Amino acid sequence: MGSSRTSRRWAGSGLVALTVLVTAGCATMPDSGSPEPVDPPSGADQGVQVRVIPVPPRDGQSPRQVLQNFLDASIADEHDYQTAREYLTPEAVKTWQPDTGAVILAATNPDASSGDGDPDHATVVLQSQQIATLDAKRTYRARPEPHYSASFTLINVAKDTGKDPKDAATKAQWRITDLPPVLILNQTNFRNAYQQADRYFFTLPDPSLPPGSPGADQSVLVPDPIFVRRRIDPASTAAAALAEGPSDWLKPAVRSAFDGTDSVGNVSTDTSGAVRVQVNGANFQANESQCGQLAAQLYFTLVSLNGPGSIDKVTLTGEHGTCYLGSAQAKTLSWAPGSLTSAANGGGVPYGRNAATGQLIRLDSNAAVAGVLGSANLPVTLRPAGGQLGPFAVRRDGQKAAVVSADGKGLYEAPLDDSAKQLGAALVTSQAPSPGQGLSTPSWDGFGGLWVVDRDPANPQVWLIRGNNSRVAVPVDLPTGLTVDSIRISSDGTRAALLLLDPVTKTRSLQIGLVVRVSGVQSAAAIIDLRAIAPQLSDVTSVSWADPDTLLALGKENGGVQQLHYVPTDGSGSATDTALQAVDGMTVVAASEDRADQVLADSKEQDPKDGDTIYQLAGSAPPTWRSYNHSGAVLPAYPG
């Protein structure tokens, strides 16, 4: 779940935040006057974050100092930004709306001010590199721009300053009268002031499937990452954000049980982890099922905020009726987050292919699977040819697998038992001239849908094959000039991690697209609104889902070496990502959506005679690569 990912990333960046804030003196060290007290970190922030004490305006500060202090005060631990508003004129107070969005910059150091000859008017320009934005729904989006510029107009509101320039400067009272309407802060202060959480929404039914078929009406909770202010009642803020509905990006693929309710009250939590929330406009006596769904959405949202084991029970009180959801019951819900992952469906074991024979094997036992794909007499089309071995994917329940032929031209499916004695016809065929341009590694969603990319330059296409082996083309809303090189679908089927190939530079970028299900004959799904979530990586070789809201990418930065990066689906880890060193020659990374499973990788050794080696990531602080000791195995992969 999201909490594990959030805790991991904060642990890696906290020391930096503490050091930078204290040494630079941004918000905790005033640039003039007596030192202000700083409360020591406590609780979840111990050794990680610092509390920001705002400094009110003082006479005699320059326009640049006033702006800097305003920026610092705006990220202080005040619910209503009271101190920051003291730096604004009454007119500016009305136009500044910090809760409607934010711009996150690399730095917030105002340039020198200019008065244009008027001693009582000044303009201060803030210029920096833009990192990201936060919208009114608290949704983070990576938006790297090399040049961001914002102008602030200030006026001197002091009266009777006298004619002596020195006396006038000492009594000057500069206030901001014109400024951008949103919050502006640097990435260090953003990490200090904000905390990430996942709010959860239900997948929509698939209108293209017959009622009662797998995936037609089954729902599962999907994470929708948000950022809330860390020390300003984050639980109540997260609950309110949940009731407001999903992000604009995720909205076309999900629904909320909160639809039709008015609002939620503040979250009340006692020392035992019991949560109480008032839901206005809800009649739980008339609709008990709605109450259970509301409680599930809220329970998993608060757990993502506070960590596993933090919530014992959630009690919802409507205008009529009350219901509750306990932690034990929450874990058994069919729609719980991650309930469609391989681990939740008995398939959380890694697989590989025998490099010499092509047999599909279980890496936990190094034994060939049952059925035609594990046969010593593998069909010729799936055997290694010319040093090539086609990729594969095991269905998330471990009952079937799909394998691409060595020449990249055919996709075949077979059960992992003895029910099928021979390989059937290809589900998809490619006319690509070479294996590297043929079919990509396939990927299964949690509803049994099989996804694969045909990289044929003459006819590139993403295909979806469903339970009755019907094949439908899936349109992708691609950026100009790029093509889809591979796809990894989330277990809930709402998001697709795509590696996009630039045919000019031959590099691959990582983007995430929203999967919307549609009814009709021509297509059952479409991938829309692609977003770059790892802009710091210039080339990505392999990607795998690490949990329902995080990807594990094998890639490199400009001029850098290949490394492993945990990438949140909203791109919020790009600025503070702590990369893991990769082994030379790594081509494939394999993770499951359960963090308890080992991360595996395939490396092509520098000496071709040694073949490939599978490594596992073991240990901590920092983890290291160790040989997995499965002789002859290549292409490690978890189901999915």
Image (cartoon, helix red, strand yellow):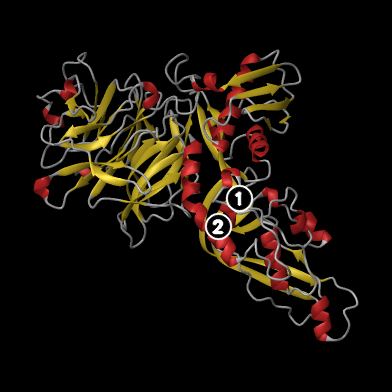
Q: How many marks?
A: 2
Instruction: Point out the tag, 2 or 1, that comes first from the N-terminus.
Output: 2
Q: Residue at x 11, y 49 (%)?
A: 608
Within 10 Å of the Cα at label 1, are there few (<14), some (14-19), or many (20+) other Cα atoms?
Answer: few
- Where residue 70 appears, x then y in whole percent? 71, 62
Answer with left or right where residue 529 lies relative to residue 21: left
Q: Amino acid at mark 1?
A: Pro
- Residue placed under numbered mark 2 in the picture: 18
Residue 118 position by quadrant: bottom right
Q: Which mark is residue 41?
A: 1
Asked whether the residues under the numbered discs 2 and 1 touch, taking CB atoms below 8 Å apart as contact, a structural biologist would say yes
Confirm whether residue 372 shows in the render: yes
- Where residue 412 appears, x then y in whole percent? 23, 27
The furthest residue to the right: 160
Rendered position, 620 above or below 93 = above
Q: Amino acid at mark 2?
A: Leu
- Where residue 259 appears, x then y in whole percent? 66, 27
Q: Secondary structure at mark 2?
A: helix
Between residue 273 and residue 108, name the one nearer to us.
273
- Where residue 535 appears, x then y in whole percent? 44, 54
Q: Residue at x 41, y 46 (%)?
A: 566
